Image (cartoon, coloured by chain):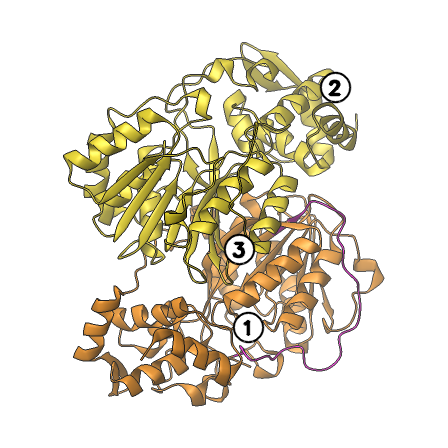
Chain colours: A orange, B yellow
Amino acid sequence: MELKAIARRIQEKHGIPATERDVVRVFSAALASPDIWRIVDLSEIPVLATCEVLRAFAEAGWVEFINARVSVTEDGKVVAESLGISPAKELRCPRCRGRGLELTPFATLAQEFHELAKNRPEASQEFDQGYVTEETTVARAALLYARGDLVGREILVLGDDDLVSLALALTRLPRRVVALDVDQRIVHFLREAAREKSLNLEVHEHDLRDPLPPELLRRFHTFACDPTESYRGYLAFAQRGLSALRGPGCAGYLGLTRLEASLSKWRQIQRALLEAGAVITDLFPNFHDYVNWPYIETMRAWPHLPVKRVPGKLEIWYRSALIRVELVEEPQVENVRYAGDIFTDEEAATT
Amino acid sequence: MELKAIARRIQEKHGIPATERDVVRVFSAALASPDIWRIVDLSEIPVLATCEVLRAFAEAGWVEFINARVSVTEDGKVVAESLGISPAKELRCPRCRGRGLELTPFATLAQEFHELAKNRPEASQEFDQGYVTEETTVARAALLYARGDLVGREILVLGDDDLVSLALALTRLPRRVVALDVDQRIVHFLREAAREKSLNLEVHEHDLRDPLPPELLRRFHTFACDPTESYRGYLAFAQRGLSALRGPGCAGYLGLTRLEASLSKWRQIQRALLEAGAVITDLFPNFHDYVNWPYIETMRAWPHLPVKRVPGKLEIWYRSALIRVELVEEPQVENVRYAGDIFTDEEAATT
């Protein structure tokens, strides 16, 4: 079987753009681990595409599914060898887990945040939620600090099941923090925490499909958001963020996965961000580690998995990149209403 | 004095795009260190722009130049306080120096590379040279390894005073490594090292203003280069690299500084890379540390420095980001000849 043919099959069956290299990525991942979640993680392509590649490999006799594990066969190893495909590697620094950031100065924040986050609302499929680890949220605050986007700044967080606004406000360094969320549980939780700790944190219930209220436009130095990953949904979130910035020199922080967005979609998104007047200043792959959500077995990708095992809550397999953008021109975005489902497309796995 | 007016002055006097935020960056840098090279580094804007901002600050009485140091005055501190400007921070992980990579598995390579690099040719102003530290070159090899762009791959290095091709070939993991350089000293040095160590490394003398020879087009999985930073020069190098790649799924590694390229130029460059069919998969700021070159006192920025001190050879102040791109489409580039000076523009500092 040709790898190119498998890439075409992904495209034809799922409408997900894929290259031969993407098929190689799954092969490398399977050579590195027999665990389905580790393979999904290391493959760095949309989950449905990884599932399709594994099925094609099984048909070719290159892998077998035994005891809920993916095992590369002797035939598979010979093919990998002949194609020059080697096991996937990671060389993550064990101290900073690959983020490059020193978090020691944030130890107190981490402790305080941990205490508050204990009673956080559980992730809800209704709102496409799934939150990052506490360490990730603290690392995000640290990056804002290091980039000069925290101290004395006015910061808007668009959608906040990660409780980023809480971590930022807890540093007591920003001039103002505003969080928007559609989920009343999150709004209530953040407000309670803000009251209890006397934080400079405002929380508004807001559906990001609706335009931003005028009083939030052109007001902030920094925004943060973790957009839904359909192209349309991503742009909606990103443009809301950009339209809230004061102008050139202001910055935005966005998450983006490889597991629900192909590199073709990444390119589309990056082009749109640049078109809107921004430049990409930082792009750290795998900055965000996600806590497993309770709806794994009802997520879109579940029936496609060739091997089914519910991962432990803190068994990290879903990660995302952090992209920092900075405006170099006045933002070119419209503050329009988005109708209908902006959450799903072909590459979606978790909704 | 208004910060915006200083930003305009940079634009008017030097033709370098600048925002109010860029002026704030220099203020933050000066609040963090009195050392001119540390300020240049932390300011993260073109060197000539930093010099202009410091002169404007001196005129306003916010800084003084005393004993070859930049000292923020009491007035300056009051202004910074009133504008909410805080000292620049870095939170670099002390283990990986902010690159996020674990280099322990490359300790033997580092030692072998160190032995060979002892007799490397010194950086020459004629060819806009200036090489990175040995650790940086090893880290670059490690990143290629982690991304699956090293083992079994055919790799092209375009311009190689950093001796990247040597480090890559020394791992003995790539299928083929080819290096191009215009400098006969580099060509000779690499060839000698390859012969001595029996490395799978080909070296050709080639001026990158000239089209790539046809036998190098569409042949490689990976390219690496550290382009000159005029917009035209950058694109010339990047497009040569892209045109050498086989197609979608192949990757390129490029350096880019903040000290000779404004964020406006970054945006132009990123747009061109995306237009050419590539996507940005990684962007690590300050991945590359440079060894100081022997022509500091004749570089373009020298006369502009408000405070003059020749930095020590390993006193790092010139750093650059590492950008990894991957093709998602067939590359859209032309293999044309570039005439004249493609090395200099308004933002140049070292040529």
**Residue A163 appears at what percent x and percent y?**
58, 65
Q: Residue at x 25, y 80 (%)?
A: A62
Tell me the amino acid under the disc marked 1.
Answer: Arg
- Residue B60 numbered mark, or none: 2
Answer with left or right where residue A98 lies relative to residue A176. Answer: left
Q: In what quadrant of the picture does the C terminus of chain A appear?
A: bottom right
Discs 2 and 3 lie in a common subunit: no
Q: Which residue is mark 3?
A: A140
On screen, residue A120 above or below B272: below
Tell me whether marks 1 and 3 sit on the same chain.
Answer: yes
Q: Is residue A111 above or below residue A265?
A: above
Name the disc covering residue B228, or none.
none
Q: Is residue A340 magenta?
A: yes
Q: Position of residue B208 (x, y in %)?
A: 46, 36
In the image, B39: left or right of A46? right
- Dominant SS type (magenta): loop
Q: CA distance from mark 2 to mark 3?
A: 36 Å
Secondary structure state at the residue bearing disc 2: loop
Identify the secondary structure beneath mark 3.
helix
